[in-house]
Image: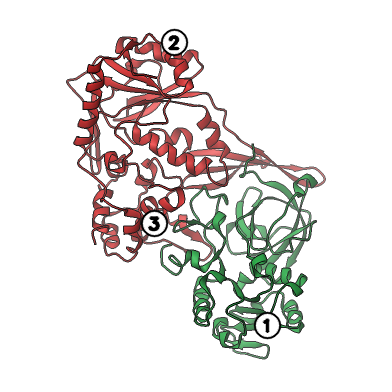
């Protein structure tokens, strides 16, 4: 009998400090027979820290990488704060992958608009890397990332590299930063929508970040003719079981853990932005 | 199997047959002023001669003139706590310190004894079906629930005395049992009409000395059902409640309810379909292991909607809205039917007597 609640042992292969509060854990399973493991960008794992508890974290590495998988985490809560003290060689528990990932097959041959805010770039960065590895399979690519302060941006070097790639537009915005040296815009990333080029009849938009940011990004996209089913959002709610049993992540009739966390806007429109859901 | 008759004086033979078959029997008994389910050794422990009085926010038991065994509606619990435990261990993590610190995990699956539950009502069977759908029939199977569920033998008893808070006739789930039982009993004076609904039930029934039921017995049973239906005064609004609730997000009634509701979560504890639970870790004092447990949770708790930096539902109005719209609207989309079976427990056990049928009639009125 498969027990979806039971974690597997994994080793921290490497720990990378991205900013003072954000770190990346590179993990692999201790028992190689657990390695029959395949995920899609946008899916998440439940990470367990001994004696402390479990937390749902998205997977940021490329699914083609067979040996290790990466999680980028901000130390904000009881479990993530304790996890920030992990070092290479330490052991954690992992179960997953869970949920629906990004619509990457559907996105092939299309323009891609990626909009992220804060650490929303973590779930979406798996998409960026996925596309960069397979750049010829996708059309025009727009990467929009908003942060509060420029220092909050992780992977700045990568954004600089991505900017150099043909047919790729990178827009960075800092909402609470006074210094606005190029390539930075001052303000919310969603106000840069006019700068973005895409074909509304052949585009998939994917976004992750604060709901207020995603809400602000949806209207300019639909105003330009992008259909609601082509706008995909990664949602976050309290998750404890990850298998649709514990009830915490219910979002109207959806379970974020198994029906999401990635949804087309058309599926969750009824609840999106409504307080209490 | 056709209806047969089991005389009350022979009832012990049913319990004996179950015990011989290896079942531990759980049945209704009076304890702490309520009818609750616990291990039953013989029929004298049943609530013989008792009757209940349930009203919004109140529940009491009385001794009555009659000598009926099942002349009451169910108390705060029935099947749910037997299958989906209020608290249980899921697994244990072991930390070993050799050269490296290593972690291992061991599932703590329950040691389950085959259990026969006597006194299950139609509403409880309907709720069991809802919990089965949730824990067993979706993408992931819950092995803890499954193990207990597979060991269950269900002896249903048709409900002859719905309480003032019952509305199972209006949800279509009772008061008489239609399916999903192993043995079904209908109490008629000094005897029970008995029928089997499964092979397991047949096997037990074959060991009993049963007589044929007469037309008169069948007529009494039909009359009992009709009387039980007619006695129910509460009902759900007529029509498609799920649709009627769809555009009620900003209805002023949510704030009106919130002025009374204490967000205590009693309704979710006694609700036979509510499934929310939280998970938690308890470290052993020797530092060598840590237990991962789950406990019933409620959408009326602040933590239920906690994500870092935000609580999704802090106001009582939103918590009540989550509970009610989940039960009557979202549930339909999730599981194909309403999450309410009309047992009336949430009305009886609400300390301030909020009546869900009244709230629904206001919300669905316009």
Location of residue A66 by image quarter: bottom right
Q: Are marks 3 and 2 on the same chain?
A: yes
Residue B207, numbered label: 2
Nearer the observer, A113 or B51: A113
Residue B285 horizontal side relative to residue B8, left or right: right
Residue at 59% x, 85% y is A177
In the image, residue B277 above or below residue A182: above
In the image, residue A78 above or below residue A214: above
Distance of label 1 from label 2 (alpha carbons): 79 Å
Q: Which chain hosts label 2?
A: B
Residue B364 horizontal side relative to residue B269, left or right: left
The residue mark sitting in front, 1 or 2, is 2
Residue B76 horizontal side relative to residue B55, left or right: right
Residue at 68% x, 90% y is A182
Residue B322, numbered label: 3
Image quarter where the N terminus of chain B lies is: top left
Residue at 23% x, 58% y is B365
In the image, residue B31 above or below residue B306: above
Distance of label 3 from label 2 (alpha carbons): 49 Å
**Mark 2: which secondary structure?**
loop
- Expressed as whole percent of the image width and height from the top left, the position of residue B156 reads 37, 26
Instruction: Tell me the green chain.
Output: A
**Mark 1: which secondary structure?**
strand
- Expressed as whole percent of the image width and height from the top left, the position of residue A160 reads 74, 82
Shown colour of chain B: red
Q: Is residue B241 visible?
A: yes
Mark 3 surroundings: few (<14), some (14-19) or many (≥20) residues within 10 A? many
Q: Which residue is the site of mark 1?
A: A170
Nearer the observer, B217 or A55: B217
Count the marks: how many? 3
Q: Which chain hosts label 1?
A: A
């Amino acid at each position: 009998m498969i027990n979806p609640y039971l974690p597997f042992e994994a080793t921290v292969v490497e720990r990378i400090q991205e900013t003072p509060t954000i770190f990346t854990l590179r993990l692999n399973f201790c028992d190689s027979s657990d390695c029959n493991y395949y995920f899609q960008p946008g899916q998440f794992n439940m990470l367990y820290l001994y004696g402390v508890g479990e937390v749902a974290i998205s997977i940021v590495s490329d699914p083609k990488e067979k040996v290790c998988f990466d999680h980028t985490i901000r130390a904000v809560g009881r479990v993530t704060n304790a996890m920030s003290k992990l070092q290479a060689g330490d052991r954690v528990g992992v179960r997953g992958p869970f949920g629906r990932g990004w619509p990457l097959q559907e996105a092939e041959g299309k323009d891609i608009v990626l909009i992220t805010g804060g650490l929303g770039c973590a779930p979406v960065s798996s998409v960026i890397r996925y596309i960069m590895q397979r750049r010829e399979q996708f059309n025009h690519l727009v990467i929009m990332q908003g942060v509060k302060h420029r220092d909050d941006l992780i992977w700045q070097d990568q954004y600089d590299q991505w900017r150099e790639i043909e047919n790729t537009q990178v827009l960075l915005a800092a909402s609470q930063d006074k210094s606005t040296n190029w390539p930075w815009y001052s303000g919310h990333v969603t106000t840069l929508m006019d700068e973005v080029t895409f074909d509304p009849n052949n585009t998939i938009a994917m976004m992750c970040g604060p709901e207020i940011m995603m809400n602000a990004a949806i209207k300019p996209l639909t105003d330009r003719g992008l259909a609601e089913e082509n706008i995909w959002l990664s949602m976050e709610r309290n998750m404890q079981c990850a298998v649709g049993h514990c009830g915490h992540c219910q979002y109207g009739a959806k379970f974020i853990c198994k029906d999401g966390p990635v949804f087309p806007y058309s599926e969750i429109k009824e609840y999106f932005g409504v307080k209490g859901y | 199997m056709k209806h047969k008759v089991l005389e009350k004086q022979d009832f012990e033979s049913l319990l004996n047959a179950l015990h011989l078959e290896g079942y531990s029997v759980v049945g209704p008994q009076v304890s702490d002023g309520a009818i609750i389910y616990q291990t039953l050794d013989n029929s004298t422990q049943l609530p013989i001669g008792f009757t209940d009085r349930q009203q919004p926010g109140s529940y009491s038991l009385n001794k009555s003139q009659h000598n009926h065994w099942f002349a009451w509606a169910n108390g705060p619990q029935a099947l749910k706590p037997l299958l989906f435990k209020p608290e249980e261990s899921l697994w244990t993590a072991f930390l070993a310190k050799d050269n490296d610190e290593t972690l291992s995990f061991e599932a703590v699956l329950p040691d389950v004894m085959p259990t026969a539950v006597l006194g299950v009502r139609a509403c409880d069977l309907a709720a069991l079906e809802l919990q089965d759908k949730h824990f067993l029939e979706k993408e992931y199977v819950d092995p803890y629930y499954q193990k207990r569920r597979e060991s269950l033998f269900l002896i249903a008893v048709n409900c002859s005395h719905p309480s003032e808070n019952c509305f199972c006739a209006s949800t279509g789930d009772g008061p008489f049992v239609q399916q999903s039982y192993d043995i079904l009993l209908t109490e008629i004076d000094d005897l029970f009409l008995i029928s089997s609904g499964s092979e397991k039930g047949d096997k037990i029934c074959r060991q009993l000395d049963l007589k044929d039921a007469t037309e008169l017995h069948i007529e009494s049973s039909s009359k009992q059902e009709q009387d039980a239906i007619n006695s129910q005064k509460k009902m759900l609004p007529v029509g498609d409640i799920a649709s009627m609730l769809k555009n009620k997000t900003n209805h002023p009634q949510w704030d009106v309810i919130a002025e009374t509701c204490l967000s205590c979560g009693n309704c979710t504890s006694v609700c036979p379909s509510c499934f929310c639970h939280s998970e938690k870790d308890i470290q052993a004092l020797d530092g060598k292991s840590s237990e991962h447990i789950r406990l019933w949770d409620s959408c009326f708790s602040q933590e239920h909607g906690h994500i870092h930096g935000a609580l999704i539902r802090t106001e009582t109005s939103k918590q009540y809205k989550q509970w009610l719209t989940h039960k009557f609207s979202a549930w339909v989309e999730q599981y194909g039917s309403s999450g309410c079976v009309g047992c009336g427990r949430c009305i009886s056990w609400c300390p301030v007597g909020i009546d869900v049928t009244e709230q629904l009639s206001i919300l669905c009125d316009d």
